[in-house]
Amino acid sequence: MQVPLRMARGACPHDCPDTCAWTVTVRDGRAIQVTGDADHPFTRGGLCAKVNRFLDDRTYHPDRLLRPLRRVGPKGSGQFKEVSWEEALDAIAQRLRAIVVQHGGEAVLPYSYMGTQGIVQGESVAAPFFARLGATRLTRAVCGSAGGFGLEVTMGSGAGMLPEDLQHSRHVIIWGSNTVSTNLHLWPFIRKANESGAEVVVVDPVRTRTAAAADQHIRPLPGTDAALALGMMHVIVAENLHDLDYLDRHTVGFDRLIERLALFPPDRAAKLTGVPAAEICQLARDYATVPPSAIRMLVGMEHHARGAEIFRTIACLPALVGAWRERGGGLCHMTYQLFGELDWTCGATVTEQAPVREVNMVQLGQALSSLRPPVRALMVYNSNPAATAPNQNLVLNGLRREDLFTVVLEHFLTDTARHADFVLPATTQVEHRDVMFSWGHTYLADNQPAIAPVGEALPNTEIFRRLAQRMGFADPVFRLTDDDLAEAAIAPLGTSRVRHLHDQGWIRMDGDEHVVPYANGGFQTPTGKCELYSQSQADLGLDPLPSYRPPAESPHGDPVLAGRFPLMLITAKGGHHFLNSSYANLDRALKAERPALLDIHPDDATPRAIVDGNPVRAFNDRGSVQIIARVSDRTRPGVVSIPSGWWASLSPGGSSANALTADGVSDLGDGGDFHDTLVQVEPVR
């Protein structure tokens, strides 16, 4: 007799704007297929190349961790012994108690990010656990924070036009985002606009897949996007292409903005950005005269010391030309703001001990190396900082400290896990309950467990519950089940919408008011208007007007540093088959991405005697990377590009892109500045 099939609804867990809804087919307790939900308005039945083999690549992969591991060799050696959960958790709790007694709770540092976007398996139990412990607080702001803060200065919120409404645009600027590779399900909406006559322009220093598919590619030097936007605004105002009625009704500070724009004529903007003045002028004219015009931005461009300033400046453009008036016009950024009515704590809180110090996650290397009093215990979950954190060598040096007690919750023996004292096997998305928000569309998804956990894997929540019990934490939060947590998160939606979510697997979170959000003003700023001049910034002693200032680590910054390391480095996400560092350990993905390549323009390669296909060394004061050169016009002169996400342990010479990147923070929002990185490149003899 044929075993009947069972279907379970869920959604992709990855740190991606698409948050694809999927259906898992189960036979006799084993998941046999994952398919995109054909009825979901954004997923529309398709999964990307990264996850369309999720079961083989993660849940049932032969290298997956299925039992707790205890280190038996040197840190980083990958030498472990399987132990029972009781032995692992007892030892971890005993060590944590001893550290807290001797050094205080702040000697413990949690480290996590968006290894899952799930509200339940993210921080629902972990955050109360570390609050109860009195641990050092982690500032999780590497992506979205700087850009969001910048947009809030101008618009009052980062929420703009809906992604699907790009299909109604007639001029689309994709600014600093590689949609085809990192936001695949948005591309059909942009392509639909293009097929209806819209011009698609990509602004990016590198010729990405998206740039290659666009009608026009503008190539500024990295981090000079604010100067490009100011140059465009100069042209728009000088040629009377601005919407004076919208400016009068719905903005403040236009007269002061005019004074600032006088400093950025096209010729000066061209010198700062490396974009010819004629291209700047034509881009400005097209943007201002072909409505509805839209700008699409995501997180890549914010990773600069002036990241918030870049976003704050670009956000002035839609108001300047009145693009907000029409559907398909305005600025399209993130959508996470639309999920604000959820209970993000899942009803699980405890009183945090104070005062508690904070560590910015982009400065993990500094925290492990020089923070005083020192970090004595590190607990990593939903993250692989040995591969993804900047200033990689400093991070690895910290992880190799023999006096640092490290615990990692993982699916695979990542570069971070290789340095752990204990590695605890975590469940994958098809094995646990969760609730999935999205930062790239408007749909909430309910992820039901399709199968029982494989091997001895446990959900993050259960691991922290068991540790809390051993630590003697009796707070009610640590007795809540995953179903309790999930239902608490969605309870504010009301009974009817919760039932709809359970029945359909997903629901839309926004209403008709978001279709044309600022057609009649209504900005969420202190003045209720789009603030071209920000009094709140002035009150903080900051520049109240949009501007461009070069960071120290740039061609226009420190001349001594730029003389030693004259090339700007872009470390873009690692292509079609990696997602941050996920999948970078799989033979299939590695073969699909080919060996990691350093893209360099012929104008920079020739004087350095660099030959296409030959090994080179990229280096600066933080480290060096050995890699194969690809000499082409994929990058503009003065810029080299290395894909991020590769594990150092699987890379030639034992280093990957983040061995080179800076680990400073941005101007607002605490984001990282790792795209402000200067390097030199030389052939390997």
Image: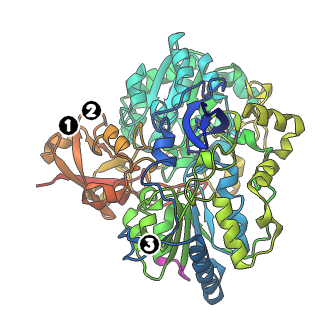
Mark seen at residue 81: 3
Residue at 72% over, 34% down: 505
Q: Earlier in the sequence, mark 3 or mark 1?
A: 3
1 and 2 marks in contact (CB < 8 Å): yes
Give the magenta-colored segment's residue range: 370-376
Towards the viewer: 162 or 331: 162
The extreme front residue here reads: 1
3 and 2 marks in contact (CB < 8 Å): no
Residue 587 spot, x, y in % from top left: 34, 45
Disc 3 on helix, strand or loop? strand
Residue 193 spot, x, y in % from top left: 55, 16
Q: CA distance from mark 3 to mark 1?
A: 50 Å
Disc 2 on helix, strand or loop? loop
* Residue 638 in which image quadrant: top left
> Tag 2: residue type?
Asp
Compared with 292, 121 (above or below) is below
Mark seen at residue 633: 2
Task: Give the residue number, with chain letter if any, for mark 1.
Answer: 602
Residue at 80% over, 70% down: 351
